[in-house]
Image (tube, helix red, strand yellow):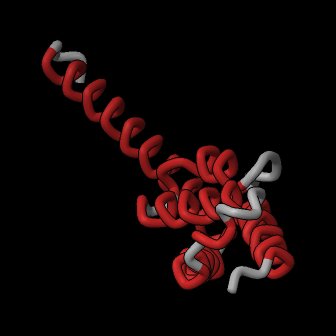
Amino acid sequence: MFDPVEFEKKQAELAQLLSEKFGASSGDLQRRMRKVGRRVPKRLHKAAKTITDAEAQAGHPKLRQFIDPAAVNRAYADIRTYLKTIDVTDRRKSAVLSVLGGLSFNLLLAVALLLGFLLWQGLL
């Protein structure tokens, strides 16, 4: 049986996790997942769609009986498990290192091209 109170608690927990891990702090679950974008797998977007569809059906008394609680719980567990495994500091550290790596490569390439040009012109 579908329990609306438990459903709201689960949605609040997912909203909190999305806010903590990705900074998606406004809007409903679908809007938050859109803000997260491709930083999460496609299967999580599908799971969020399942939860959003269940939320739309929960507002109508006759449609509420067609909600599959097992699918909603499975989607919730899938999203929650993935979000719990994300380490925010590691993600930020890898982003900074990626930018610094690209910058250092470009700097080395520019120096090598400058040296090559100077050798070609006979200035070195």
Which of the 4 quarters of the picture holds residue 85? bottom right
Q: Position of residue 53 (x, y in %)?
A: 60, 57
Residue at (77%, 57%) from the top-left corner? 59
Residue 42 vs 26, above or below: the answer is below
Residue 110, above or below 102: above
Numbered circles on residues, count:
0
Picture coordinates of residue 115, whole percent (x, y): 26, 29
Residue at the far top in the pictured view: 121
Whether 14 is drawn above or below 111: the answer is below
Q: Residue at x 52, y 78 (%)?
A: 71
Residue ID at (41%, 36%) = 107
Look at the image and tell me whether residue 83 can be seen.
yes
In the rendered image, residue 97, in percent from the top left (x then y), is placed at: 53, 57
Q: Residue at x 82, y 69 (%)?
A: 12
Judged from this view, the residue extending furthest toward the front is 62
Q: Look at the picture and state if 59 lies above or below 108.
A: below
| The C terminus lies in quadrant | top left
Camera-side residue: 119 or 22?
22
Q: Position of residue 88 (x, y in %)?
A: 68, 68
Q: Is residue 92 visible?
A: no
Judged left or right of residue 107, residue 122 is left
Looking at the picture, tell me which residue is in the foreground, 90 or 41: 41
Write down the quadrant of residue 78 in the picture.
bottom right
Of 22 and 59, the residue lying toward us: 59
Q: Quadrant of residue 1?
A: bottom right
